[in-house]
């Protein structure tokens, strides 16, 4: 039993509330270098503990929700039907 538990822990990484840059980059699906750049620029919510970046999972989730809402709003502009271009019939 003990080996199967240890083996299953290797397959499913533990996601903690406070993550280092490697864990957070895996969580977000981006490279650690990109995440370091984003953290340094203040683009993603992060804080420094000593000289190392740390990321709270809950803050990253909130940030992703806001980014998703912003992207959705940009993709779905309101269309004024009076200003639509006429569609030419197919020939």
Image: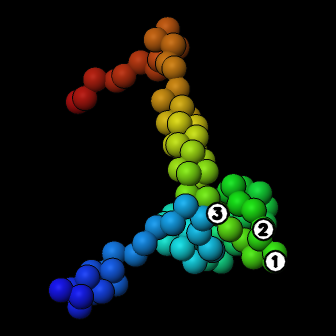
Q: CA distance from mark 2 to mark 3?
A: 9 Å
Quadrant into which the C terminus falls = top left
| SS at badge 3 | strand
Q: CA distance from mark 2 to mark 1?
A: 6 Å
Lower sequence index among marks 2 and 3 = 2
Residue 82, above or below 60: above
Quadrant into which the N terminus falls = bottom left
Q: Nearer the viewer, residue 22 or 67?
A: 22
Q: Looking at the image, which residue is at 23% across and 91% down?
A: 3
Q: CB of mark 2 within 8 Å of CB of mark 1?
A: yes
The part of the image, by quadrant, that contains residue 25 is: bottom right
| SS at badge 1 | loop
Q: Residue furthest right?
A: 50
Q: Which residue is mark 3?
A: 55
Residue 89: x and y, percent? 28, 23
Residue 48 numbered tag: 2
Q: Residues within 10 Å of mark 3 (few under 14, many from 20)?
A: many
Q: Nearer the viewer, residue 33 or 85?
A: 33
Residue 80, above or below 52: above
Residue 78: x and y, percent? 51, 20
């Amino acid at each position: 039993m003990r080996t199967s538990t240890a083996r299953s822990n290797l397959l499913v990484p533990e996601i903690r509330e406070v993550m280092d840059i490697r864990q957070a980059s895996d969580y977000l699906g981006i490279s650690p270098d990109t995440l370091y750049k984003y953290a340094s620029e203040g683009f993603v919510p992060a804080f420094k503990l000593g000289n190392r970046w740390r990321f709270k999972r809950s803050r990253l989730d909130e940030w992703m929700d806001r980014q998703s809402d912003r992207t959705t709003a940009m993709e779905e502009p309101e269309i004024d039907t009076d200003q639509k271009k006429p569609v030419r019939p197919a020939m």
